[in-house]
């Protein structure tokens, strides 16, 4: 799960680059970003929970 979290964070970074270079428009970026942030939050919770055990 920690590897998935690292990959999700990298995806968020690349989405920002795609927006900043106008490869994707703001509407598409927002849609993708919301999903990515939600996934990152879930992965953080999963990693934290698994570390407690």
Image: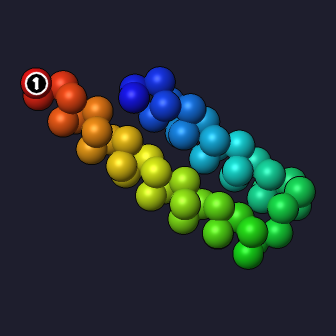
Q: Residue at x 44, y 47 (%)?
A: 40
Q: Residue at x 78, y 58 (%)?
A: 19
Q: Residue at x 55, y 54 (%)?
A: 36
Nearer to the camera, 36 or 25 = 36
Q: Residue furthest left?
A: 53
Direction from residue 50 to residue 9 in the image, left or right: right
Asked if 28 appears above or below 38 in the picture, the reply is: below
Q: Secondary structure at mark 1?
A: loop
Pinpoint residue 24: horizontal percent, then vertical percent.
84, 62
Asked if 46 appears above or below 1 in the picture, the reply is: below
Q: Name the residue beneath numbered marker 1.
A: 53
Direction from residue 52 to residue 7 in the image, left or right: right
Pinpoint residue 31: horizontal percent, then vertical percent.
64, 69
Q: Quadrant of residue 10?
A: top right
Pinpoint residue 27: horizontal percent, then vertical percent.
73, 75
Q: Residue at x 39, y 29 (%)?
A: 1
Asked if 26 appears above or below 39 in the picture, the reply is: below
Colouring mode (rainbow / by chain / secondary structure / one colour): rainbow
Quadrant into which the C terminus falls:
top left
Direction from residue 28 to residue 46 in the image, left or right: left
Q: Quadrant of residue 20?
A: bottom right
Direction from residue 39 to residue 11 in the image, left or right: right
Within 10 Å of disc 1 (Cα), the crowding (few <14, some 14-19, many 20+) is few
How many callouts does the rendering have?
Answer: 1
């Amino acid at each position: 799960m920690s590897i998935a979290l690292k990959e999700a964070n990298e995806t968020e970074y690349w989405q920002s680059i795609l927006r900043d270079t106008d490869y994707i428009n703001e509407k598409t970026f927002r849609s993708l970003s919301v999903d990515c942030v939600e996934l990152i939050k879930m992965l953080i919770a999963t990693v934290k929970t698994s570390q407690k055990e």
